[in-house]
Image (cartoon, helix red, strand yellow):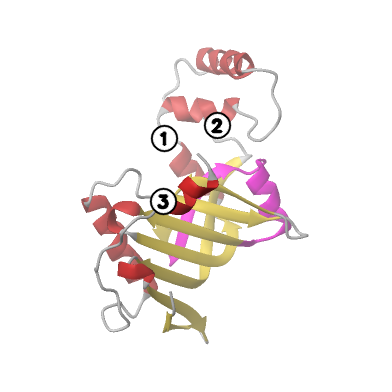
């Protein structure tokens, strides 16, 4: 595909309206509403979100993770603390999350600060996962260089044998949850002629304020 073909790619957007008056006063209530509509629309993995992190000197990176909780107005997900994202979070706790629900022509962008959740909560979630996923978390030195997939396979076999009679595994200390507390949340609704609706919620004096942004 050449540049002309890329430039010619176009997607027409609908006319579903999203305004200051139709949006909820609380961004988490608004998110919950849109998230439910994404589920009801049977979109593939509506809880998939891009997590953007950066090193202390500002080098960014992004990857897809899965939302696993909305608790105390925070967005919760789980991962390996020793992964690249985990190391960058240690250096710089400012992160961004982005949801894209193409079937509804909607995007939600969240900027905020991240921190680890309580170890007990991480353990409870870890041990609720399928046993194969628990073994995978132990087997993979996430983001480290490995010689081949055989290295992972051999480790999985070892762990499967070791925990053959156990229903659940202990949680690795290097694996657990993070919670992102939002400073701002933007809701984007696709509209015709690229005149999209954008409503931004900003935290001011512990209260949320809504403003409309130009597309």
Q: Which residue is mark 1?
A: 129
Tag shown at residue 9: 3
The answer to which of 212 and 76 lies nearer the viewer is 212
Q: Which residue is mark 2?
A: 137
Visible residue check, residue 84 = yes
The answer to which of 208 and 64 lies nearer the viewer is 64
Which stretch is magenta? 72-94
Q: Position of residue 135 (x, y in %)?
A: 51, 25
**Residues marked 1 and 2 touching at CB (< 8 Å):** yes
- The correct choice, above or below, for 79 with respect to 149 in the image is below
Query: What residue is drawn where x is 31% and y is 63%?
Result: 32
Labels 3 and 2: the sequence-earlier one: 3
Residue 89 quadrant:
bottom right
Query: Label 2 crowding class (10 Å Cα cut-off): few <14, some 14-19, many 20+?
Result: some
Q: Viewer-nearest of labels 3 and 1? A: 3
Query: What residue is drawn where x is 52% and y is 87%?
Result: 205
Say if the magenta span includes residue 130. no
């Amino acid at each position: 595909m050449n540049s002309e073909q890329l430039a010619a790619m176009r997607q027409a957007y609908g006319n579903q309206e999203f305004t200051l008056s139709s949006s909820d006063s609380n961004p988490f209530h608004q998110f919950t509403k849109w998230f439910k509509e994404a589920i009801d629309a049977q979109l593939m993995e509506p809880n998939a979100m891009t997590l953007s992190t950066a090193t202390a000197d500002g080098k960014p990176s992004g990857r897809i993770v899965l939302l696993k909780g909305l608790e105390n107005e925070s967005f919760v997900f789980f991962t390996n603390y020793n992964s690249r994202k985990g190391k960058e979070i240690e250096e710089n706790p400012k992160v961004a999350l982005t949801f894209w629900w193409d079937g509804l022509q909607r995007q939600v962008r969240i900027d905020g600060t991240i921190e680890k959740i309580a170890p007990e909560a991480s353990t409870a979630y870890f041990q609720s996962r399928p046993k194969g996923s628990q073994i995978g978390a132990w087997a993979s030195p996430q983001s480290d260089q490995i010689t081949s997939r055989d290295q992972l396979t051999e480790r999985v076999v070892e762990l499967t044998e070791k925990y053959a009679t156990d229903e659940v595994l202990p949680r690795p200390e290097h694996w657990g949850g993070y919670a992102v507390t939002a400073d701002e949340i933007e809701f984007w609704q696709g509209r015709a002629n690229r005149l999209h609706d954008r409503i931004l919620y900003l935290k001011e004096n512990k209260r949320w304020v809504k403003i409309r942004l130009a597309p």
